Image: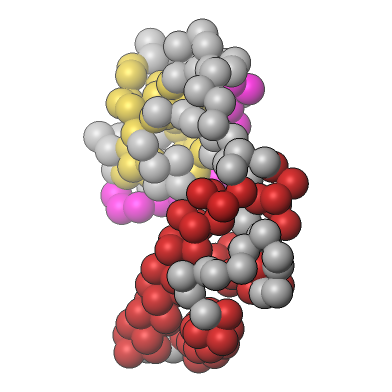
Amino acid sequence: MAILAIGEKVLAGTSGNPAFPDPPVRMEVLEQALDEFSLAIQAQAKGGPLATAIRNNARRKVMELLSRLARYVEVRSNNELPTLLSSGFPARNRSRAQVQFPKAGILKITRRSSGQLNLQESAIPNARCYQVVCTQVGPDGEPVPSRDAGRFTNCRAIPIGGLTPGKVYSFRVRAIGGSRGSGYWSDPVSHRCR
């Protein structure tokens, strides 16, 4: 988990670091919280709602400790990147510049229920949402006019409904945002609705 990895780097980087002589969190407390979180992750893999709740609580505790340390490190490093990085925290990119989005890509199409499919799109950083166009493919392979299937914020679960079971549909996706207002359309991917 990313939080655990960052926490371990911060523990190693901040412990005994002369740039951070008086952290608001004792390193022993952070180390204990990281150990508890690591054990909770392992236990959660074997299951159950209780194990998940314990893991979530352990994660929340680590996040709170890291948040307090991050504010301290940001002030103490005084905008000096090498000092900040010596703490184990990664530097944030504060650039607000918009970039041109790459071409989108549909990773997978799966069945949700009769007349519904679920698309999974490759994530594009900083995309506001994903626009989907749906085209029914006729029996002779010729596409019927496309329809806008909507805009979706979760690229891993894009539900497309109102489809006719037994018909083949072609889908294209693009990311909305970036310097041009939208990215390039994905290659079309076809799937038979069940």
Left or right of 194? Residue 102 is right
Q: Residue at x 47, y 29 (%)?
A: 127
Q: Is residue 46 magenta?
A: no
Image height of 139 relative to 9, above or below? above
Looking at the image, the residue that sits furthest to the left is: 162
* In the foreground, 57 or 114: 57
Viewer-side residue, 132 vs 110: 132
Q: Give the residue drawn at x 40%, y 47%.
A: 157
- Asked where in the image residue 162 lies, by quadrant, the reply is top left
In the figure, 46 relative to 78: above or below?
below
Residue 136 in sight: no
For the point 53% across and 69% down, which residue is it? Answer: 23
Residue 161 spot, x, y in % from top left: 28, 38
Q: Is residue 116 visible?
A: yes
Residue located 57% across and 80% down the image: 27
- Give the quarter of the image for residue 9: bottom right
Q: Is residue 87 left or right of residue 31?
A: right
Q: Quadrant of the N terminus?
A: bottom right
Q: Which residues are magenta?
A: 101-114
